[in-house]
Amino acid sequence: MAARSSLLTHMQIPSVKIDDLLAAANARRKLLGLTLLDQLTQDTRLDAGLTSSSSAPAFNKQSALRDLAAMAAARMQLPELAKDEVAALLATMTTLADDPALLAALRRRTLVEQGIELVDGPYCPLCDSPWESERHLRDHLAIKLEKSNEAQRLQKDLFANANVLDQALSGWLSQLATIRRLATAHGDEAFVAAIDRWAAELGQLKGNFRSLDGLRGISERLASGWHAVPEGFDEAAAAFENMVADLPDQTATVDAQTFLATAQIRLADFRENMRADKAADLAVAAATCAYTTYCEVMDAELEALYDDVQQDFSTFYRLINEDDEGEFTAKLSPSAGKLDFDVNFYERGLYPPGAFHSEGHQDSMGVCLYLALMKRLFGNQFTFALLDDVVMSVDTGHRYQFCKLLKTHFKDTQFVITTHDRTWAEQMKSAGLVTGKTSLRFHSWTIDTGPLVESNVEVWDEIKTALDKNKVGVAAAALRRHLEYVSRHLADQLGAAVAFRGDGGYELNDLLPPVLARFKTICAKAADAAQSWGNDKGKAEATTLKNKLSASNAASSVEQWAINKAVHYNEWENFGKRDFAPVANAFRELLECFRCQSCESWLFVTPRHKPISLRCACDTVSLNLDPKPR
C-alpha cells in the first residue's frame, strides 16, 4: 500500500504498530512541551496541541530528503521490478504470435463451448454444415476445445504476469505522487511537469493490461523496458533535490512541528486507505451474500419450475403417444449454467431426446415442452398461441391425439394453427378441433396480391365501395382474387377436369371454364337420374339449376375468353365505372348458381372418385346422380 509506505518512510519506523507510531510522535511532542500521547484511537491526532502561531507549513526538510532518497532508490530498482514476469509475458505473446491457430482458438473458445452444448444431431449448431454423424461433429469440436485449452492456459499465465507488472507500476506511480506534492508545495513547475508526463505515459500503459489485444499492442514497449525514463526527468529530479538540500536547516522546534504536521497528514491518508479497504471488503461480502442468496432463490424457483414443467410435459407427451409410451417420463435438471433434458426411452433409461427418438417424436416433444412452459408461466392467462406447421413429422395417428391434447387441456386457449398439409387440415376438422367456419384456405401467394383466401359476402360490398369512389382498379383486383379462389375451390369440390400445370400457377381462365363445363354436366346427369327414377321434383331442380347457369351473362362471357382476348379479365382495369359494374353483378349472379341459398356453402359432389350426389352442407340441395338400373 502506497500510503503505508509513505507513512513508514516519514516516521522512520519498520511497521505500522501503535507503539512505534506513538514513540516516534512523542519524541517530537516532548521536545515541543506537548502532552504525550498514551493511546492511538481513530480520533487521535499526532499534531494535537500545535497552535496556528507555533505551527509552521507542513514541510519537513529531513522527511522530504528521505522521500527523495526513497524515490531515487526505487528508481534504480525499476529494471528489476517484475523482470521475470515481463519476460514470461513476452514469451507467451511470442508463442501466440508464432501460432495463429492457437490465437484464433483462444478467440473462439467461448463460441466452441456453446456449440458443444447445442449439438443435437449431425448438423453444426454454429453454421448448419452437415457432418457424417453427431459423433464426428462432437470429436471435431472437442479437438478445437482441446487446442483452445492450451491457449486458455497461456492467457491465464499472461494476465497473471500482467497483474504483477500492474502492481509494480502502481507502486511506482504512488511514489511519484508523493514527490509531486513536495514539488508542488515548493513551486517547482519543471519537476511537476516532468512527473506528470511520466505518470500519464505509465497510466496509458496500464490501460492495456486488461486485454489480449492491449498487451499485444505494447509488446515492443515492454521488450525495450516499461520503466524507460522520459527525457529531462532525472535532471529535473536532481535540481529539485538540490533545492531542498540547499534550504536552511530547520531548528529542532520547527523540525518537530513540521514532522508532526506531516505525520498527521500521512496518518490520515493511511487511515482513509484502511477505511476504503474495509468498505471494499464489506461490499465484497455483501455482494457475495446477495449473489449467494440470489442463486439459492433462483435455483429453488427454477427447480420448482422444472418440476412442474416436466410433469406437465410428460403428461402431454403420454397423451399423444398413449398407444406405445404410456409410461413415459422426463427429467429437467440444471447443471453448470445449462439445463439438461433427458427423456425415458421405453423403460431403458433416460437419454437426450435426439439419442433414440425419431424426428416425429422429437417434434411432438418440442410442442409439449412449449405448452407445458406456457401453462406454468401464464396459467389462466395463456389464452392465445400461434402454431406453425408443428406436426409435419408426426404420423397420422398421433396427430389425432394432438388434437385431443389441445381440446382436453387447453379449452380456454385460442390457437391459430397454420399448415401446408391439407391432410392435417382435414384431420383437425374430423377431430373436431376446427370447423369449416373456423378454417381458411390460402392459395397462390404473390408479391402483388398476397395470398388468395376464401372471401365472405362482404367482398361485394368492398367492390361496391371501390366503384362508388371510382376506383375501378381496386374493384377489379378484388373481383379477380375472389373469382380465382372460388374457381380453385369449386374445381376441387366438383372434380372439374383442369389441365395440369407443373408449377401449380393456375389462373382464372384455366379454372373457371372447366368448372362451368363440369357443373353443366353434373346438372344434366342429375336431371337424367331423376327422370330414370320418376322423380319429377328432382328433375325440375336440376333443370332449373342448369338453365340458371346458362342464362348467366357471365357464363357466356367466360366461354368467349378462349377465342376473344378483348374480353379477358386482364382488361377489366381499363374499364370505366359504368362498364365494370355490370361485369361484377354478372359474376355475382354466376357464383350464386354454385351456392346453397340456405347455408351459403359451396356445392360439392360426393364421393369424389365416382360422384353419386350433388349436395350442400345442410342437405337443402341434394341431387342424385346415380340413375336407376335398367
Image (tube, rainbow, N blue to C red):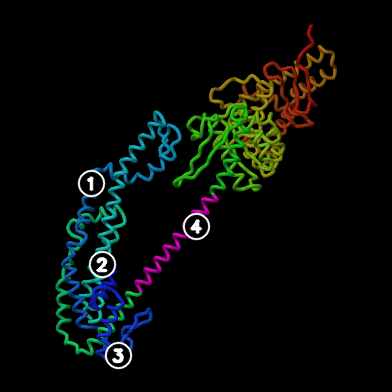
User: How far is mark 1 from mark 3, CA to CA?
Assistant: 65 Å
Tell me the CA gap for discs 1 and 2. Answer: 29 Å
Residue at the image position 79 percent from the left and 11 percent from the top: 628
Instruction: Kindly report the distance in space between the C-alpha atoms of the residues bearing marks 1 and 4.
Output: 43 Å
**Residue designated by label 3:** 34
Q: Magenta segment, which residues? A: 272-301
| Nearer to me, 366 or 68 | 68
Question: What residue is at 38 percent from the left and 44 percent from the top?
Answer: 111
- Residue 439 percent coordinates (x, y): 67, 34
Residue behind mark 4: 293
User: Marks 1 and 4: which is nearer the front?
Assistant: 4
Q: Which mark is residue 145?
A: none
Q: Quadrant of residue 346?
A: top right
Mark nearer the N terminus (4 vs 3): 3
156 displayed left or right of 228: right
The relative height of residue 241 versus residue 143 in the rendered view (above or below) is below
Q: Which mark is residue 95?
A: 1
Q: Going by the image, does 150 lie left or right of 42?
A: left
Which amino acid lies under the numbered mark 1 shown in the image of this protein? Thr
Q: Position of residue 454 (x, y in %)?
A: 66, 34
Of pointers 4 and 2, the one earlier in the residue sequence: 2
